[in-house]
Image: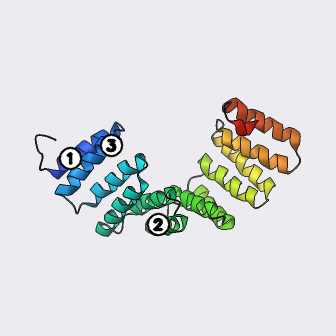
Amino acid sequence: AELNPDDADVHYSLGECLEEQEQWPEAEVAYRLAIELKPDDAHMHYNLAYALGKQGKWAEAEAALRRAVEIEPKDADTYFNWGLALYDLNRYEEAIEKYKKAAEIEPKDAATYLNWGNALYYLNRYEEAIEKYKKAAEIEPKDAATYLNWGLALYYLKRCEEAIEKYKKAAEIEPKDAATYLNWGNALDDLNRYEEAIEKYKKAAEIEPKDAATY
């Protein structure tokens, strides 16, 4: 980058290279330099937001994504990542609005519906969350996290039998996730199926022996 200090694209390319090496603070610096030279490039603001998010700087990431949307208002990924930033700031209602916008632009992205469901879940809007998880599973039927979170929403609605079916599906896709077996055990325990619950807790403990919640 020293060879062309006034070339925004050089700084941007350097940022991308640093990003590939997961050198997030250095990537942030490169993207900021690129933006100084080319402030109206949405991709530069988007990538800056990504590097900031990787460092947990969600408020700054949200500001960068806001600017990216001002420049390019029809990019679904920007709205999606804006939603993620708001979600990590515990601003769930605002995150939902961004996921909704992302889905309007790109209605076939499973991750949008999964994260939309997660925001609804944290607002205790379980029925609505289930609808989003269902949509995510229709688009991407092989994502274990979708079924796990779907199961959790069902569990909190006291629909334990249905929750168990979702945990079972999650375990089929990802058999090494302790959280799936732990929550499966909880649902069985609530149904007074104690021996089965113990088996699931044992399985969770085998996968994650340092998790006190499994004991």
Task: Provide residue 51's location: percent of width, then percent of height.
Answer: 36, 48
Query: Residue at 22% across / 63% down in the picture?
Result: 40
Query: Residue drawn at (52%, 66%), measured in percent from left and top?
Result: 96
User: Are circles 3 and 2 on residues that touch, CB within 8 Å?
Assistant: no
Disc 2: CA contacts within 10 A as few (<14), some (14-19) or many (>=20): many
Q: Which part of the image, by quadrant, shows the C terminus? A: top right
Per the image, label 1 sits on a secondary structure element best described as helix
The x, y position of residue 128, in whole percent, is 64, 67
Disc number placed over residue 113 in the picture, else none: none
Residue 119 spot, x, y in % from top left:
57, 61
The kind of residue tagged 1 is: His
Amino acid type, label 3: Pro
Q: What residue would you read off at disc 3?
A: 25
Decide: few, some or many residues near mark 1? Use Cα within 10 Å; few <14, some 14-19, many ≥20: many
Q: Secondary structure at mark 3?
A: helix
> In the figure, residue 37 lies in which quadrant?
bottom left
Q: Is residue 121 left or right of residue 22?
A: right
Relative horizontal placement of residue 84, taking residue 130 as reference (left or right): left
Residue at the spot of label 1? 11
Residue beneath disc 2 = 98
Residue 177 higher or lower than 7, as above or below: above
The residue positioned 49% from the left and 58% from the top of the image is 89
Distance from Cα at disc 3 to Cα at disc 1: 14 Å
